[in-house]
Amino acid sequence: PPCAFHLFILYIGALGARVICDNIPGLVNKQRQLCQRHPDLMQSVGDGAQEWIRECQHQFRYHRWNCSTLHRHHAVFGRVVQRSSREAAFVYAISSAGVVYAVTQACSQGELRSCNCDPHKRGQGRDERGNFDWGGCSDHVDYGIKFAKAFIDARERTVKDAHALMNLHNNRCGRMAVKHFVKLECKCHGVSGSCELRTCWSAMSDFRRTGDFLRKKYNAAIEVTLNQDGTGFAVPSNALRRPTKNDLVYVESSPDYCVMDKAVGSLGTAGRVCNKSSHGPDGCEVMCCGRGYDTTRIRRVTQCECKFRWCCAVECKNCEEFVDIHSCKAPKHADWQDKT
Ligand SMILES: *[C@@H]1O[C@H](CO)[C@@H](O)[C@H](O)[C@H]1NC(C)=O
Ligand SMILES: *[C@@H]1O[C@H](CO)[C@@H](O)[C@H](O)[C@H]1NC(C)=O
């Protein structure tokens, strides 16, 4: 099945506490083995799916493609995204990042049998400010990366084509994005906070940073083809840039996502809310693909004229206002008949 890996994550997310590796459709052997060996890790992978799907939807909330096809309901009935599009590149990257994040987080919480806080962050460390003692729990992000690589990449290693090579490349980008935002956090000790002594641990940043980062990579993604011997990517000789390890790559151009087409993971934009005064992707012209929009006036109650009252309450009035909401018209199915 297309994008079996994502269907699979959604599937375990839905199963709750029971992960039954034999019943999960679309796993390759290596994945099934890993699943059987690490059922608790699988559970964190499934739980973590909520977070990266939410992040994907946040990043694309103002776009025609808004990542909603990743809902289980849709995914089961159609494609998640066009197999090798720019959007697929983003989905592979952010889901790989999401697996790294979820597994690493679960390791740190001591919930798992196979991993824990980073065992290498012990004793003395050093950064630009000098020496410190490792303490507390350092996120073992290298473990998360190792697991995500073994598990997610296993599928792509069973075939050798442009699509598989693209996925491997973008998966890696996603994993590295999480590592990119690992930071050192420290606590000061010593005479009245003099910070003569420091205890530090390394910690992942908020997942939003990874999301923002990968979103920029999506904007700058590079279209490639497979090179002659099938071992790497080629770009047209007039291309502006060659991809590096840190660029997202794709091989197929995207559909316009204007109309519903489940075969390419497009829900269409009928009914989507748009912004009349924006010329960006959320503007009605772009969002509605020139089909026009409907306007509804809604009543909204907001808190207003808030006053601080001694002590210690804020009192507000309820104000009512009317706002216009614009939403895209559905395509007229008769259009094509009229033209003939
Ligand atoms: C995304 O778009 C679909 C289809 O147009 C719509 O049904 C859905 O509510 C949107 N999702 C979000 C999170 O905006
Ligand atoms: C609509 O777009 C305009 C121009 O980009 C922006 O200033 C405004 O905040 C947007 N309105 C909403 C409701 O997002």
Image (cartoon, rainbow, N blue to C red):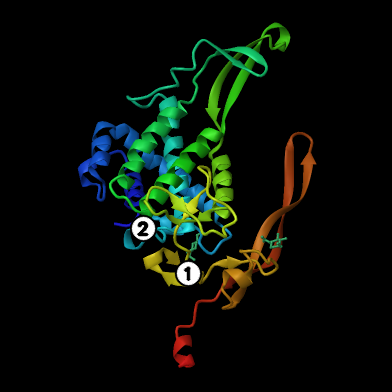
Mark 2 and mark 1 lie on one chain; the one further toward the N terminus is 2
Q: Which residue is mark 1?
A: 268
Image quarter for ligand 2 equals bottom right
Q: Residue furthest left?
A: 22
Asked whether, in this view, residue 197 is left or right of residue 110, the answer is: right
- Image point (58%, 46%), residue name: 212
Q: Is residue 89 visible?
A: yes
Q: Quadrant of residue 129?
A: top right
Asked whether, in this view, residue 335 is left or right of residue 18, the answer is: right
Query: Quick one: 71 or 170, which is closer to the camera?
Result: 170
x, y percent for residue 273? 58, 66
Q: Quadrant of the N terminus?
A: bottom left
Q: Is mark 1 within 8 Å of ligand 1?
A: yes
Q: Quadrant of residue 42?
A: top left
x, y percent for residue 238? 57, 60
* Amino acid found under the numbered disc labelled 1: Gly
Instruction: Decide: is 334 above or below 266.
Output: below
Helix, strand or loop under label 2: helix
- Image point (44%, 21%), residue name: 117
Q: CA distance from mark 2 to mark 1?
A: 15 Å
Residue 75 numbered mark, or none: 2
